[in-house]
Amino acid sequence: MYYSLNKYLKKEYGEKVWKVPVDAGFSCPNKTVSSGGDGCIYCDTASFTHVEAGGIAYQVRKRIEKLRRRNINKFIIYFQSGTNTYGDIQTVKSRIESALVDKNIVGIHIGTRPDCVDEKILDFLCRLNEKYDVTIEYGLQSSKNTTLKFINRGHTAEEFARACQRTKAKGISVCAHVILGLPGEIRRDMIETAEFVAELGIDSIKFHHLQILKDTKLAGLYREEKFRLLSEEEYIDILSQCLTRLHPDVVISRLIGDSPKELLIAPEWPSSKTEFINKLNIFMEKNNLYQGKLYTG
């Protein structure tokens, strides 16, 4: 019904491959004084930081050591926390290269923003791409500029499109991050975001449901009851429609968000990822939906 990351990795490498999350110490331009310092209204860095303390190489070695005990022998380094190209070329180059400490590292995934990648960084990643499977993960969240302004993203959909085009021109894979259920958006808006990234020829995508986290501006707005969240049933319906708009070869790297329970205010679903995926699969099968069904190219 959809081309999952697990299917892609098994096809590409013939065995289990695991992501190794790394905190490389990068900050975010959207949290600087010049940008207002608030960042995106939903952002709490602690919600996606799950790595051991210490230097970059230390983090990688410790995590790989644990994975090898589980008979996992191929790894993708995932620069997850912060904006991992936010710095001069020497800083970016040094931090990324310091993570490449094992001969069984096959890929590098770099989480960043579309307004934080220049030609020097792309040229560096292009060279790395000759040895590793390099993917740049660009946060988009929505193709609607009114939404991007409301959530304080600090860039436009057009900037995202230009970053994708420049990156793919270098032969580097692009993963888009999208949030479904952002305040003010209706079903059609979310589906149009999927159509927008499909037209750009992205290689993979991560879907997240909107989550309200403690100590965020979004949490304050939610308490004031200024918007409602999608139900699990609504999310499954919209997500299914988004999947039908994507090319069949686009890798679905994530279907739903995941935040620590101690930080999460709402929603209370899903009870588990496994249960959610089962519900999604049943819904798509029942309604004869599958990835690429409505892709127009």
Image (tube, helix red, strand yellow):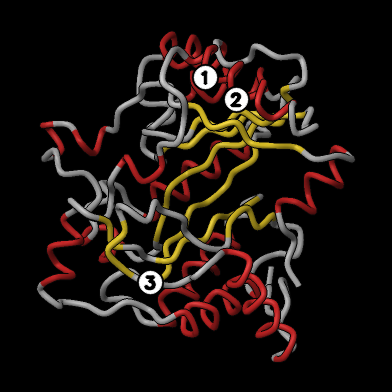
Reply above or below: 65 against 216. above
Q: CA distance from mark 1 to mark 2?
A: 6 Å
Where residue 285 appears, as percent x and y from the top left, is 74, 85
Q: To which residue does mark 2 refer?
A: 63
**Kind of residue at badge 1:** Gln
- Disc 2 crowd rating (10 Å Cα; few below 14, some 14-19, many 20+) is some
For this view, does 144 lie left or right of residue 101? left
**Kind of residue at badge 3:** Glu
Assign the N terminus to one quadrant of the image: bottom right
Q: To which residue does mark 1 refer?
A: 59
Q: Residue at x 61, y 28 (%)?
A: 77
Q: Tell me which numbered mark, 2 or 3, is placed earlier along the sequence.
A: 2
> Is residue 128 shown to the viewer in this render?
yes
The local secondary structure at tag 3 comes to: loop
Residue 268 image label:
3
Q: Nearer the viewer, residue 177 or 61?
A: 61
Q: CA distance from mark 2 to mark 3?
A: 30 Å
Q: Nearer the viewer, residue 168 or 154?
A: 154
Reply above or below: 241 against 212. below
Residue 117 image label:
none
Where residue 227 appears, as percent x and y from the top left, is 21, 77
Q: Residue at x 49, y 24 (%)?
A: 119
Q: Are marks 1 and 2 in contact (CB under 8 Å)?
A: yes
For this view, does 129 lie left or right of residue 31? right
Q: Residue at x 11, y 40 (%)?
A: 36
Q: Nearer the viewer, residue 159 or 242?
A: 242
Rendered image quadrant of residue 276: bottom right
